[in-house]
Image: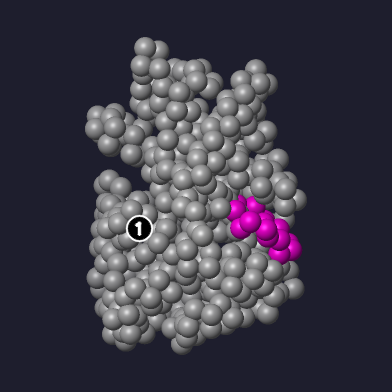
Amino acid sequence: MLLLGYDLGSSSIKASVIDAATGRLVASASAPGQEMDIASPRPGWAEQDPELWWRYVQEATAQLRTKVNLQEVGAIGISYQMHGLVVVDQQHKVLRPSIIWCDSRAVGIGEKAFEELGPQVCLSDFLNSPGNFTASKLKWVKDHEPEVFAKIHRIMLPGDYLAMRLTGEINTTVSGLSEGILWNFREGGIATNLLDHYGLSTDMLPTLVPTFGPQGEVSAEMASVLGFRAGIPVAYRAGDQPNNAFSLNVLNPGEVAATAGTSGVVYGINDDARYDAQSRVNTFVHVNHQPMQPRYGVLLCVNGTGIQNSWLRNKLLAGDISYPDMNRLAAEVPVGAEGVRVLPFGNGAERVLSNQQVGGQVLGLDFNRHDRRHLLRAAQEGIVFALNYGMEVMKSMGMGVDTVRAGDANMFLSPVFRQTFANVTGAVVELYNTDGAQGAARGAGVGAKVYAALPEAFTGLQATQTIEPKASERDATQAAYEAWHRALKTALRKQEEAKPVVS
């Protein structure tokens, strides 16, 4: 039997097929050929058209049909970009572009709710500030687009939308609700206190289904469009970061996963519900959570990761250089980039900075000494340093970070990036032959009961590289981080000083 996983990202749609018996990757595809556009009609806004996602799902699936017999697929799993908002009417028609994860328009709404409901209520009930998450984005639509809001039948996360297109059913998971700040951890149910505060009805929420298990069957119409058998179950769904952790077999307390795609994330597992009082890192329900065996994922996110690398390549360097060549050039410069510092915060409000928007910044350039190699290295170091800044918050919550697992992909393909990560965090980095789409396929096998137990799902998962901290680079890396940290504190202070005084 074959298992199919889709990974609906903000840069592309990836699809992977694995052999259920061996765990071996049989075929993979992605669409479009270059990164998907993110529309920004106003500063701080970020939107994508769900119909484009569906078009690229079809294109990626068409690529798979040339490589493998999709009639042999026995179950489908879905991974998706977290925190987005999709709204549809009673005919399941999308009413407006999706407000995606890095959109900042609802920051003020969430901060106001945090103060009005009270920090203690929000942190005890939601483990987070309402912040810039899905519930706050829906409140923004209610306040600013009443004509759209009046037509809403159901709201969805991006993965819920893809499942709807496949099956015709609208449902979601507890893990999904928790990422939208729509779940009350203390009560173990819908966050009605936040919804009531926002004037939102629970009737808008999808039906709850298990993360692993039946979530609907592919309709005859969609089976014909995509080349499947009708009735194939969609049997797994998770946000991209919980799913990335699952794909790396990160399921138990003390285990940590990382990814460095459009955004950069470190995601660690706890068995008790902890929170950061400033909500700089966020706690959600993990994929294997059970009431009698709780599992929570603590998520650190840096929005400006692969998107910064993409900006450098496509905007600054005009697309005339490949990512491998960028990595090679970055490695020609010593640790610390000879004084160049990059703050990678040009992709919206950053939770780890308490929703401040300091923007992307390049500091310390000397036109007589530095060239593009220095900028490329400083950019990669800046991303790692931003991740380490957030990991210090996670450590303050009692999270151990001795070993970090990641897929051998995206920015972890760069020797500079992965070695800097090991050097500054002190963690051993283990890279594996997997990605989010493969993880979703394995999850589908669990949900469809192809695998009798979770450990069986990881047959074929292998480490490709292990990167340990280099003692010879430790002092230089730490010095570079401290200089970067000082630059960040200066930027945050200037940001605070620039705020208008409210009398």
- Residue at left offset 72%, top offset 48%: 396
Q: Decide if residue 449 is on the left or right side of residue 312.
A: right
- Residue at left offset 63%, top offset 56%: 278
Locate residue 443, reporting x and y percent: 53, 63
Does the magenta segment cover residue 276?
A: yes
Residue 372 versus residue 2 in the image, above or below: above
Q: Nearer the viewer, residue 408 or 97?
A: 97
Does the magenta segment cover residue 389?
A: no
Residue 13 versus residue 156 in the image, above or below: above
Check the image and tell me how it is coloured.
one colour
Q: Main secondary structure of the magenta part?
A: loop
Question: Dividing the picture into quarters, in which one does residue 402 lie?
Answer: top right
Question: Dividing the picture into quarters, in which one does residue 174 lie?
Answer: bottom right
- Can residue 327 be seen at all in this image of the molecule? no
In the rendered image, the residue lying farthest to the front is 503
Q: Nearer the viewer, residue 457 or 353?
A: 353
Residue 471 versus residue 176 in the image, above or below: above
- Can residue 171 be seen at all in this image of the molecule? yes
Q: Decide if residue 372 is on the left or right side of residue 364.
A: left
Locate residue 225, reporting x and y percent: 24, 70
Q: Nearer the viewer, residue 232 or 85?
A: 85
Q: Decide if residue 294 is on the left or right side of residue 168.
A: right
Q: Nearer the viewer, residue 488 or 454?
A: 488
Number of residues whose C-alpha sits closer than 10 Å to that of mark 1, classed few (under 14), some (14–19) or many (20 or more): some
Q: Decide if residue 143 is on the left or right side of residue 266.
A: left
Q: Give the total number of marks visible in the rendering.
A: 1
Residue highlighted by disc 1: 45
- Residue at left offset 63%, top offset 44%: 391
Determine the secondary structure under disc 1: loop
- Residue at left offset 37%, top offset 54%: 44
Q: Label 1 sits on what residue type?
A: Trp
The span picked out in magenta is: 267-280
